[in-house]
Image (cartoon, rainbow, N blue to C red):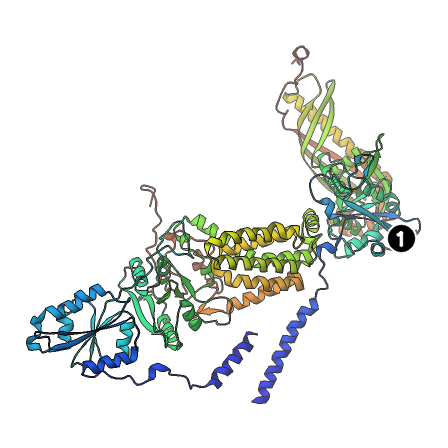
Amino acid sequence: MFRVIRRMHRKKRTSGGDENAGGSEKKAAPALSGGLKENLELFRGILGSSTDIVITEFNFGREKKAKGALLYVDGLSNKELLDNTVLKPLLFDECFIAGGEVSGLETIGQSLIAASGVKKKTDVNEIVGDMLSGNAIVLIDSFAAALSVENKKWEARSVEQPVTENVVRGPRDGFTETIRTNTALLRRHLKNPGLRIETFKIGRQAKTDVVVAYVKDLVMPGLVDEIKKRLQRIDTDAVLESGYVEAFIEDAPYSIFRTVNDSEKPDCVAGRLLEGRAAIFVDGTPFVLTVPMLFLENFMTAEDYYQRPYYSTYMRFLRFLCYLLAVFSPAIYVALTTFHQELIPTKLLFTMAAGVAGVPFPAVLEAGIMILTFDILSEAGIRLPSTVGAAITIVGALVIGQASVSAGLAGPFMVIIIAITAVASFVIPALTASSSLLRYFFLILAALMGGFGIAMGLMLVLVHLISLRSFGVPYLSPFAPLNVSDLKDTVVRVPHWAMTMRPRVLGLLNRRRQKSGLRPSPPGAGK
Amino acid sequence: MKFNHVGAMRKRTKTALCLLSVLMLAGCTGARELGDLSVVIGMGLDASAECPEGVLLTAQIVRPSEMKGGSSEGSAGDQDGQPQPSRAYWNIRATGETVLDALRECTHETNNRLYLAHNQLIVVGKDAAEAGIGRHLDAFLRHSEPRPSTVLIVSATRASDILDVQPELDKLPAMAVTKLTKTQEFTSQSKAVNIIDYANAMLSKTTSLVIPIATVFEEESGAKTVRIHGSVGAVFKGDRMVGELSESEFRGYLWAGGGIRRTVLNIGYRGGRVGIDVVQAGSDTEVSLVNGKVLARVKVKQEGRISDNGTNVAVATERDFRDLEALESEYIRSEIMDTFNKARDMNTDIYGFGEMVSKKYPSEWEGMKDRWDEMFGSLQLEVSVESKLRSSGLVIYPIRPQRDRGHEKREN
């Protein structure tokens, strides 16, 4: 089925032709001229009469003969700082400008403007881009270039606890919408000179900053080049969120499983970089992508590494179990009640039979209705403002619980099954997107063919999972292909002193993570 | 190029159709909703008067709605001001040439096909058992629904009598009787037999099967109960019932066969009775050919503890224990011999000696197998019992008025 879609897509792409390729940025860029007036006209022409664009003209020099202009976007630049670092020195420190002649733009940039990031730029598009991302632009008469002064400041959300990945123990800082803050957060966790941060601008219209971060000597060989290649392919209006980027760079665009992971937590991203992965930051979103992704990552949380290994192992096991429950329990219930009644314990069978005595629908329809109701409720719970959220809880409890049973819409056992499914699916939020669809898939198979159908569907899903790759790494590794030494951080999580090696599929460059023999022992307990 | 493309298209369509047809093949044919099941929990097989070659089948069907909740206070039938408990089962009877024929006959009366996968009990009426059960039970091994673990019992009267008695503690007669056969392990005077045991015995040419007998007892008040008591074992020769075993005879059979789990022995000792709770028992049987005759040696090992002391003396010394162990051994030996003699009289090899001989002496067995009945009649049995008393319980002296105890002290 996917193949059909893919083929249609391919056809469209080839027939559509290249008439649109290139896009707006290929237009011949107008050059700066020597006159300030002309230059200002040029910028006014490009930027229009937007009210948030501030253009201040000023005269400076000993006899105020020199003319200049300051351009910035109101709200993106620090006005106060601009006054102190740019305007004040230019207007009052006259000593440098002998006889009203401005000797060179570099001189102003290096000697007069008291800001750290000053660059001379000549390309108009680049200058406009700088300005729109918060820099201040200084234009001086008689120079066909501009100074771009680093002066960004805007209202931003402060570093807060992330909403998606809650931890009891562990750092509580989360990424914000500002890319610089995010890279800084990452660097605070990884004070490593090898941490490389490379910026791209993506989006014809929006020109969003996208950053690739990796640790130079650890990252999987070839990974960074591949990421860059895939990022540079992106030629679209805008990447408003990292989900856009994910859609353009992922390996299996038709799969219901994602092959690019994300995180809101700097400690998680740092941990993944240290295993040989790379991170992709997108300006404007706190969700940072990490690649390559393994299926196993869905079952991991940051806290696994901060707690005692026994409990972490138990939790990992529990998450696997919950995933199975979330996907299979309605299907298994339907298979048992319509095909394999002999597998139900005798006494339970009687209670179950009594429970569905008044229900007019077949089990599969009953399950379908209940799952749909649950999905509606959970979606409503997310979308609603929290003030009305309580109403949903009450209505939900009534609809899914008591009322549906007493109204004869569903049996009490079905309610239990759906409740288990619901709670279990919340244990692994990373997989909700796929598990809620798989649930229907298996439900239908179970209704048609019982346990045989479930087994067939499972084969299908497993074959699909095994065939997936994320940036060249098998999705199901280290299970398939089996890698025994990497199993120490899968369903079991061994203590940190026992994890001496990086995962084999990722940390090829530098396998050893730590000294071996770090297991602590009390003094005098022998060597 | 174009041709190729069409070919690939056709191939793909074919594959898709094949996959779809797989869905259709398995179809919904096997699907049954829970509400559409008539779950049979117990079945009775009786000789039929109207169809002498056939079978009168009683199927106990569960009413799930009555199974709900703890107590069986029913809403139905309020006669004479007394609440009449509504029954959680429905016994339906049908006659047929074969078991399956009778089963299908039931659908003339029930609104659903009978579902046998949860059947727990097959009761065979005495008439039917004496006429031979093989042709009836074949269906239970052949059909995919019934379980091999289904318990098999013989009714002292008609099978339907057993299934009609409303038990006191359970809601379903079939379930109650099934549990009853399993609780026999506390006395080991009877032992549950299931369809697999039956099949194994039938596959052997010589071994006879012993199936527990359940009897309906009627009390003076008119209340009926089902008991495994009195005459408790139906001895089969082939698939026909030929005789019965009493409680002690059944235990004698189990001692030799290693089927004792727990039991109580009451030994007369020093003017009273000492109850011994047997907690562990095992047996080892060996056959040998001596001068063309078969000699079987049964070694029984059992361990027990004194569970009650009806005498007035403390049974606590080494000597007491040795004396009691000897008495126990003799008691068990005589039980075994009694049963063996009875089995020999009936000419039923309930112990499976024939099988043992055939395994140990395969070449000699060739000449023996056709005259095994005769050989079994002259079979010699040697029994040795090793008894062990482990403890006298939590107290040593019998707890009696002090006067009684003092002057009865042992003089040694």
Q: Is residue A178 left or right of residue B35?
A: left
Q: Name the amino acid type tagged 1.
A: Gly
- Asked if one can make out residue B190 in the rendered structure from this viewpoint, the answer is yes
Relative to A167, residue B222 above or below: above
Q: Which residue corresponds to mark 1?
A: B54
The image position of residue B21, as x and y in percent, is 68, 72
Q: Could you say where residue A309 lies in the image, as x and y percent from the top left?
A: 42, 49
On the rendered image, what quadrant is the N terminus of chain A found in?
bottom right
**Residue A321 seen:** no
From the top left corner, tell me how far across and down residue B8 is, in percent.
59, 83
Pointer 1 chain: B
Residue at x 76%, y 32% (from the top left corner):
B333
Question: Quarter of the image holding residue A21?
Answer: bottom left
Q: Height in image: A216 above or below B220?
A: below
User: From what the image shows, is residue A18 above or below residue A417?
Assistant: below
> Which one is nearer the viewer's eye here, A409 or A101?
A101
Q: Up-down: is B194 above or below A18? A: above
Quarter of the image for residue A294 reads bottom left
Q: Residues within 10 Å of mark 1 (few under 14, many from 20)?
A: many
Dot 1: what SS?
loop
Q: How many marks?
A: 1
Question: From the viewer's perspective, is A173 left or right of B19?
Answer: left
Q: Nearer the viewer, residue B294 or A194?
A: A194
Front position in the image: A399 or B15: A399
